[in-house]
């Protein structure tokens, strides 16, 4: 009899995941952590197509939520991750505290840093969800922060309302992506989002993150431009920096003098930080941030093999 009940509960939760997903896909949070505003395709080192994804790409044609909209949909986004945790740990109807402890030893997510990010993000979101759901949270006097209080009315912590969108995107990613397929690119996105949202970067978290190779910071307020060279045969002997770097441009400076002060070296070359490059290497697609190329100026394409990514990311 119990087994029959379990199967009904599992079917219900699976259906709920689908319904939640259909709701969330209508809004901008479903884009996840990576924001691509333009996708340029190159063949024979010549720009073939340039797609303005803000107006063209289906994933961009969603409803934008303001900070109060993000706050309103947060319980649904959290519910999606909570159901995933329930199904993974077989902890349906268990207390949140029990699930948080079990996430510590979960073997389903093999990447230790992503496992720790998920556990901590889930922990913080449980508190925020409970305070909001049970009306033990207020807005600060300036309307900029959610103030979570204990039963006595004392402040436990404050969460910037402007960060609700990024929190929803992080939770959506943790709930909907196949975390064991995350390479350096996706891990860097998760790591950067968590650091931007929460301040509990203690020695334990630092030790785990130091064990993750190749992590780079991402600015989640950026809209990135993708330079797609996946249809080109890139010379494996030429460092990527040598091929794609260029002299700095005086555009944006009020005068040539101001430009020369900012860039005194006449031989300086750089790659704009909001660029992401896609290459084909053996059987993988690599998505490499400009910062990674700039930090490894003498490295060729083969040296960036850890930047393989899942194709449906963009």
Image: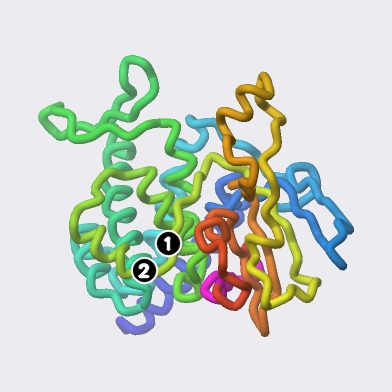
User: Which part of the image, by quadrant, shows the C terminus?
Assistant: bottom right
- Could you tell me which residue is drawn at 67 percent across and 61 percent down? 242
User: Which part of the image, by quadrant, shows the N terminus?
Assistant: bottom left
Horizontal and vertical percent position of residue 64:
62, 37
Horizontal and vertical percent position of residue 87:
38, 72
In front: 218, or 244?
Answer: 244
Q: Which residues are magenta?
A: 304-312
Residue bearing mark 1: 215
Badge 1 crowding class, 10 Å Cα cut-off, few under 14, some 14 to 19, many 20 or more, is some
Q: How is the image coloured?
A: rainbow
Whether pointer 1 and pointer 2 mark residues with C-beta atoms closer than 8 Å, the reply is yes
Residue 27 visible, this orientation: no
Residue 131 visible, this orientation: yes
Q: Secondary structure at mark 1?
A: loop
Horizontal and vertical percent position of residue 282:
67, 84
Say how many tags the image has: 2
Residue 243: quarter of image = bottom right
Residue bearing mark 2: 212
- Could you tell me which residue is drawn at 23 percent across and 74 percent down? 105
- Could you tell me which residue is drawn at 74 percent across and 48 percent down? 38
């Amino acid at each position: 009899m119990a087994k029959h009940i379990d199967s009904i509960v599992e079917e219900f939760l699976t259906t709920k995941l689908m319904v939640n997903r259909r709701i969330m896909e209508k809004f901008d949070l479903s884009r996840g952590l990576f924001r691509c505003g333009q996708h340029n395709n190159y063949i024979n080192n010549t720009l073939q197509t340039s797609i303005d994804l803000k107006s063209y790409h289906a994933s961009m044609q969603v409803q934008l939520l303001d900070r109060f909209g993000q706050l309103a949909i947060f319980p649904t986004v959290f519910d999606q991750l909570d159901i995933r945790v329930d199904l993974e740990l077989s902890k349906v109807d268990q207390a949140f505290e029990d699930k948080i402890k079990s996430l510590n030893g979960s073997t389903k997510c093999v990447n230790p840093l992503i496992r720790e990010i998920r556990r901590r993000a889930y922990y913080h979101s449980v508190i925020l969800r409970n305070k909001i759901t049970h009306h033990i949270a207020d807005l600060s006097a300036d309307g900029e922060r959610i103030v979570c209080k204990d039963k006595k009315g004392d402040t436990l912590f404050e969460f910037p309302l402007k960060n609700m969108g990024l929190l929803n995107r992080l939770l959506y990613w943790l709930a909907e992506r196949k975390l064991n397929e995350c390479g350096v690119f996706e891990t860097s996105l998760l790591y950067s989002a968590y650091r931007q949202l929460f301040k509990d970067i203690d020695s334990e978290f630092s030790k785990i993150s130091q064990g993750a190779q190749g992590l780079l910071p991402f600015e989640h307020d950026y809209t990135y431009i993708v330079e797609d060279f996946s249809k080109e045969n890139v010379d494996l002997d030429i460092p990527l920096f040598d091929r794609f770097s260029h002299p700095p441009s005086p555009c944006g400076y009020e005068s040539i003098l101001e430009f020369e002060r900012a860039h005194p070296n006449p031989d300086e070359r750089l790659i704009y930080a909001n660029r992401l490059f896609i290459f084909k290497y053996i059987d993988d697609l690599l998505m490499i941030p400009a910062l990674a190329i700039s930090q490894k100026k003498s490295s060729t394409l083969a040296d960036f093999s850890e930047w393989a990514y899942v194709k449906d990311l963009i």
